[in-house]
Image (cartoon, grey):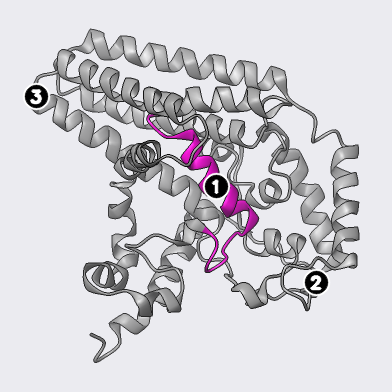
Amino acid sequence: MVTSSVTPPTKVGAETTASRKEFGALVRLVRGAGLLERRYGYYAVKIALTALALAAGCLVFVLVGDSWWQLVTAVFFAVMFTQIAFLGHDAGHNQIFRTGPANDRVGRMLGGIVGISYGWWMGKHTRHHANPNHEDEDPDLDIPLLAFTRGQSRDRSGLVRWTAKHQAALFFPLLLLEGLNLHWAGVEAAWRGGIAARRTEAVLLLVHAAVYLAAVFVVLSPPVAIAFIAVHQGLWGVYMGCSFAPGHKGMPTYARETRPDFLTRQILTSRNVRGGRCVDFALGGLNYQIEHHLFPGMPRANLRRAQPLVRAFCTDRGIEYAECGLFTTYRHVLNHLHDVSAPLRARGAA
């Protein structure tokens, strides 16, 4: 159960008048500082530089040819795919343009470049933002091979029980499969339907797969091509997982009967990562998870400026504001995974 000096509502799903007024005051503070305005220049430069870097990488890939040095370019493309995914995340939150359709067009294009279904991701991520760390309604807590609560540990059986039992040790190795999981989830969503612009999504995924595999197997010999794909997709998955996990994993979770108000649940279920511009770049602004969850439409470039305002707001009202260094964050994540799986390792546990 989430605890805070801000009293949770007595009725599930209700927002207290005091909480609404508190959040309204914070919104006025942030808006008054101009932090909710679009940053067209920032995104124009960011997208242009990312496109140039991707084009340069493709050129190097062709020039290097069939060589084991291509494993170095595979690392580069893993970084580029994640940076492109960050831009897709920004588009999904309407951070780039004012209108939803314009952001969606960019988001679908970016998703197609990396082979992710934008529509599938939008549905999943929207539910996460509405219910961060909700044990039943946050899809980011519904990962079969892992357990994020003691209750999930008890429900695991068979292979997934074994992976959950050793999940702290397996966490980073399992992320090597995350890239393939993202691709497959997109294909499955496009096949089954239930997402916006299904045909467009399907075409984008098919084009991505065709261009990617053709480029790899035309330029590279089969052994090098397979190694390239393994390194690229594996490290992309690790980078994506290492970027999204610090924001919530190891933070308080809650159930339906203990659902706190919007302000409380967005702050107390989120964790910021300290660091300078390098961390901002590496994590795509997700290191400002608290500010992002309070103001998901805030352009990424403004999150750094919003942080001291939000932190001071929390301090003045006695609301816990979680932040720590990058490696400390990963230690918290691993410690949490180890703790919730303890019953599975207890003597006599099946």
Q: Nearer the viewer, residue 57 or 209?
A: 209
Say whether disc 1 or disc 3 marks the residue closer to the N-terminus.
1
| Callout 2 amino acid | Val
Say whether disc 2 or disc 1 marks the residue closer to the N-terminus.
2
For residue 129, side relative to residue 199 (left or right): right
Secondary structure beneath label 2 = loop
Answer yes or no: do the residues labelled 3 and 2 have beta carbons within 8 Å? Answer: no
Alpha-carbon span between mark 3 and mark 2 = 59 Å
| Callout 1 amino acid | His
Q: Which label belongs to residue 222?
A: 3
Q: Is residue 50 magenta?
A: no
Residue drawn at 26 percent across, 20 percent down: 210
Q: Which residue is mark 2?
A: 6
Secondary structure beneath label 3 = helix
Answer yes or no: do the residues labelled 2 and 1 have beta carbons within 8 Å? Answer: no
Q: Residues within 10 Å of mark 2 (few under 14, many from 20)?
A: some
Q: Which residue is mark 1?
A: 125
